[in-house]
Image (cartoon, rainbow, N blue to C red):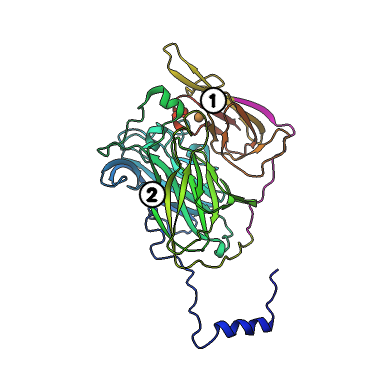
Amino acid sequence: MLARPSLAAGIALCLVACGDDAAPPVDRSQPADFLAELELAAIDDADPDPRVLEVTLRASITELEVVAGLTTPAWTYAGALPGPLLRVTAGDRVVVHFENDLPEPTTVHWHGIRLPAAMDGSPHSQEPVEPGGTFTYDFVAPDPGLYWYHPHIHDAAQIGFGLYGALLVDPVEPAPADLGDEVVMVLSDISIDDEGALSSPDQGGDIATLFGREGEDVLVNGRVLPTMRARNGKRQRWRVVNAAKSRYFLLGLTGHTFTRIGGQMGLLEAAEEVDEVLLAPGERADLLVTPKGDEGAIEQLMWLPFDRGYGSTEFRPPKAILEVELVGAPLDDVPVPALPATPFEPLDPAGAEQVEVRLTSAQDEEGKLILGINGVPYDGTTSLPATVGQTQLWTVVNEMEWDHPFHLHGFFFHEVNEEGAPRREWVDTVNVPRESSTSFLVRYDNRPGMWMFHCHILDHADAGMMGMVELLP
Ligand SMILES: [Cu+2]
């Protein structure tokens, strides 16, 4: 509790500050052009009901200037890179009239959302949407958090060409107003040649597949090294998603720390003060950060090399991906309000069925790289059984010399350590370090159907590191 200043102290303060020329009120507002270079596209809501978001989302090739001076035929949702920010409140219905104006089939997957299998946008939950075709996605977004949408056919190519967008689900009880000025950041990368054309998604052959192709230009909300003009010392809340097809983002802001208040779903019970934040492909973070320093200084959000195996740190210097210009004299700090944590009740491991999934690599007779699950490359015919209401204890064993970010569609899970203690956080994607294993508990609620799981380095998923759970009623 704050001590109340004494009357004498108040008078003393007034002698300094309450004269004829009282100091003007301190400007705590963000500059008008705060997010001018970070603006995400908006989209019209056709339904007047505040609990329904109904949009028409068209995928098409759109000529954009992604890299200065070059015109690139990017693959886009609603003509924008990234696609428009979709925003609802937990429990709202989302209706997306999807139109495919691309030259090849596609789908839209809603990463992390607990929706019915038929709305999941995987190639086993629906017929692919052919060029010129349409499909209506219609589901409820039940849980607060930052999610994202992307295709689930030719994943590495289509996402690498620009098809991704953020879906932000607000909690029913709004966060405290003074938590921080919200900024949604979609991190990605893209490969563009000297003429502005998109690079081939197959270039570099098996070696590139094995590493996972990263785009050379790193993008924050679709821009190369944008600038944010920020009120110096004013707290911000960064909602960050890694939408890159292969690139990991280890993030640091020069001279600053982050307070991690949430990850993939809801708010943590206990916030964490961290110097750096790691986001493997598909992961999200909810961060408080107070950019503060000398007036006019520029702080840099850095991509830092993260060791995910051979080639990931060698000759790869840190790289600035966003500049934060500090506007005005530094403000005094304002305490972080109490956060309404999302209730976390760990799953009971008693009676959980044990499932072991190995992430494996091999070569076929011609020497071509084959990635797989338990030695079997994905071919859409085999699945692991599960039943509604069941709890499973998965152990994902990574036999390879590179890390793999593991994603299960449609269900949150929580990790357990070797002693069986839960990590108190629901996730749908987790990084499995090389030559190591990760265990988690998952409970299947009543949404039967085919649910995919795969590595979120999408070159790996495309090369076979993908499988399915068939959830039976
Ligand atoms: Cu992988």
In the image, residue 240 above or below residue 5? above
326 or 155: which is nearer to us?
326
Query: What amino acid does circle 2 point to?
Result: Leu
Magenta segment includes 355: yes
Whether residue 139 is visible here, answered yes or no, is: no
Query: What amino acid does circle 1 point to?
Result: Glu
Q: Which segment did they paint magenta?
A: 339-357
**Residue 401: mark in rendering:** 1
Task: Tell me if label 2 and label 1 are in contact, CB under 8 Å.
Answer: no
Q: Judge from the rendering whether residue 168 lies leftward or rightward of residue 158; answer left or right.
A: right
At label 1, counting other C-alpha atoms closer than 10 Å, the crowd grade (few under 14, some 14-19, many 20 or more) is few
In the image, residue 412 above or below residue 361? below
User: What element does badge 2 sit on?
Assistant: loop
Magenta segment includes 349: yes
**Residue positioned 27% across, 39% down in the render:** 196
Q: Residue 222: x percent and y percent?
A: 37, 47
Q: Quadrant of the N terminus?
A: bottom right
Q: Judge from the rendering whether residue 54 lies leftward or rightward of residue 271; answer left or right.
A: left
Q: Residue 124: x percent and y percent?
A: 47, 30
